[in-house]
Image: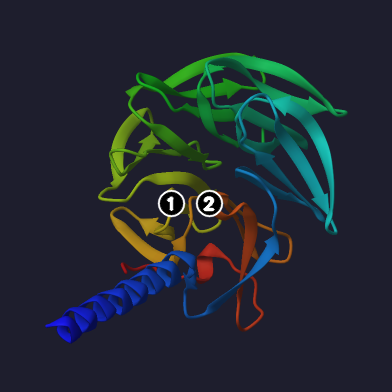
């Protein structure tokens, strides 16, 4: 009957609307650890990827294509371009007081910015993640078939291959002890390099991206580079993770600033958000109880 068909159509529309609303709420909702709260720090940062905090400033890379990518400085909300005309600038670190960045395309040097001018240090291919130790040594991972993990020895200028034949290398970080962690996104694995030996450290992850090492607690932070369901994870032991935030959109780099707040580059929403403890204490890896969520 006509009224039955009309009722069925109306019910379908209502159900579809509610389902769409639920999906929208889920994809827009960021949920953090019970002890944390988050807020939006900066917006309008197209394809934000790399992130570093140094003194009162933060630095980001905007990973756009067509040679319009940028390395940007933000101080008290004021933005200035450090380097422009880049092609997919991705990884960012601070080495011996200087900014160092990668470009994730073809053959490209790793660049160090000195007095506002970028200087090529060594050649990579589709380089993504980068990290530095206190002595200035650099560690880089390439995101390409047959990619590599590389170490640039500052004192000699030599480049060493620490791992080869990678499929989708993305994140990398190094401890002062010489232990290195790196991830293969598509395999969902984070590996550990110690004394020249490579072992699986975390498995069954969903697109692990950026890695941040914490020397004090010998633990690591990991972001999962997923468009709508990305997570921020913390691990202090092999095959154990603690979920610190969910509902992130393509989360990239994280850093902890001088005030003890954790900053995260959320590429899918073109912004930087910050997490802080509700009790006002500084966020430190050593205060996070090891466990699995």
Q: Nearer the viewer, residue 267 or 155?
A: 267
Q: Residues within 10 Å of mark 2 (few under 14, many from 20)?
A: many
**CB contact under 8 Å: marks 1 and 2:** yes
- Among numbered discs 1 and 2, the one appearing first in the sequence: 1
Q: Nearer the viewer, residue 290 or 77?
A: 77
Q: Nearer the viewer, residue 197 or 190?
A: 190
Q: Which residue is mark 2?
A: 268
Q: Which residue is mark 1?
A: 227
Is 154 situated above or below 135? above
Q: Secondary structure at mark 1?
A: loop
Q: Is residue 272 left or right of residue 20?
A: right
Which residue is most to the front?
2
Residue at screen point 73% across, 66% down: 259
Q: Tell me the quadrant of the picture where the N terminus can be found.
A: bottom left
Q: Position of residue 253 (x, y in %)?
A: 56, 48
Q: Secondary structure at mark 2?
A: helix
Q: Position of residue 225 (x, y in %)?
A: 43, 48
Q: Tell me the quadrant of the picture where the C terminus can be found.
A: bottom left
Q: Residues within 10 Å of mark 1 (few under 14, many from 20)?
A: some
């Amino acid at each position: 009957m006509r009224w039955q068909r009309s009722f069925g159509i109306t019910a379908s529309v209502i159900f579809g609307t509610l389902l769409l609303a639920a999906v929208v709420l889920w994809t827009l909702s960021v949920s953090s650890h019970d002890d944390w709260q988050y807020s939006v720090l900066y917006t309008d940062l197209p394809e934000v990827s790399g992130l570093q905090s140094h003194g009162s400033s933060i630095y980001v890379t905007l990973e756009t294509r067509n040679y319009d990518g940028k390395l940007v400085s933000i101080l008290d909300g004021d933005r200035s371009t450090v380097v422009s005309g880049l092609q997919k600038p991705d990884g960012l670190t601070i080495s011996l007081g200087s900014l160092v960045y990668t470009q994730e395309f073809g053959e490209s040097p790793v660049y160090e910015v000195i007095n506002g001018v970028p200087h090529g240090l060594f050649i990579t291919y589709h380089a993504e993640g980068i990290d530095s130790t206190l002595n200035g040594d650099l560690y880089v991972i390439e995101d390409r078939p047959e990619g590599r993990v590389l170490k640039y020895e500052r004192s000699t200028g030599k480049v060493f291959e620490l791992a080869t034949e990678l499929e989708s290398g993305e994140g990398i970080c190094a401890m002062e002890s010489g232990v290195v962690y790196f991830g293969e996104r598509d395999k969902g694995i984070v590996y550990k390099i110690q004394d020249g030996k490579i072992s699986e450290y975390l498995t069954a992850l969903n697109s692990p991206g950026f890695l941040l090492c914490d020397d004090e607690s010998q633990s690591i932070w990991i972001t999962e580079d997923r468009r709508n369901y990305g997570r921020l994870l913390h691990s202090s032991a092999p095959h154990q993770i603690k979920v610190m935030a969910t509902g992130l959109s393509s989360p990239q780099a994280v850093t902890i600033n001088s005030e003890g707040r954790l900053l995260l580059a959320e590429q899918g929403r073109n912004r930087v958000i910050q997490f802080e403890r509700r009790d006002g204490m500084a966020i430190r890896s050593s205060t996070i109880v090891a466990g699995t969520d």
